Image (cartoon, grey):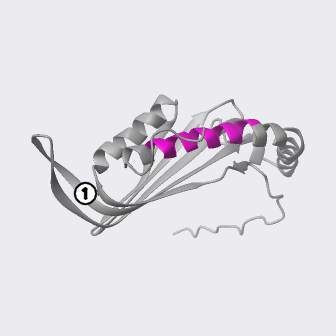
Amino acid sequence: MTEVVVPPPDTSLPRVLDKFDAPTFMVRFKGVVDFDALYNMVCKWLRYRKFQVYETTHKYKPPEIEVVLDCRRKKTGYKRDRVKVHFHMFKNRDVEVMKGDKIVKMMEVRMTIRFSCYVETGYANYFGWNRWRTSKLTMVLQNILNRYILRKEIDSVDADALYYELYDLQKKVKDFLKMEAHGGAY
């Protein structure tokens, strides 16, 4: 029997700036909602904007449900957009509602929806290794590239455009939940 020894992490490596955050949004809702339709609307909206949608978490512990969507969109070989949509529902119960002539199953729920986004750099794993993590020199070069050369472009162009796209998604969700007047500031 062989013993596997895991070396301690190398703490002398420089910290790499590879994530540019944009502000997050939150929607709180209490009422009756068709969650399947809301979920499908959010997924269709993200796929229409060329995001790859992955459901990373789906916890069902009655009376609580938690669903996390991790969405990625490649911009270049060096940058990509990331969006996370986190649905957290409390005290949910199924109800039947009359809509016109039909009886529709819906959920009476307290819900929190968090929208967060960021621009990720140096993400590519070619052939199972990340070229920016191979040595200290490449990590320092990536830091210089991100902090001094590309920072202004990423912050003012990429992260800002992603922020307004996510704001549009939040507005669509609020319209779906009938939480505000139609339209928006942008």
Residue 18 place in picture, x, y as percent: 74, 48
Q: Which residue sits at x=67%, y=49%?
A: 22
Identity of the amino acid at label 1? Met
The residue that mark 1 highlights is 107
Residue, x 65% and y 47% (percent of image)?
118
Question: Above or below — where is 151 with respect to 108?
Answer: above
List x then y, in percent, for residue 94.
20, 60
* Residue found at x 59% / y 41%: 185
Q: Which residues are magenta?
A: 157-172
The quarter of the displayed image where residue 91 is located: bottom left
What's the residue at 82%, 59% (across, down)?
Answer: 13
Residue sitting nearer the eye, 54 or 110: 110
Under circle 1, the secondary element is strand
In this orientation, does residue 128 appear? no
Q: Using residue 102 as the reference point, say whether residue 51 is left or right of it.
A: right
Q: Main secondary structure of the magenta part?
A: helix
Residue 139 shown left or right of residue 185 in the figure: right
Tell me if I can see residue 42 in this picture.
yes
Q: How many marks?
A: 1
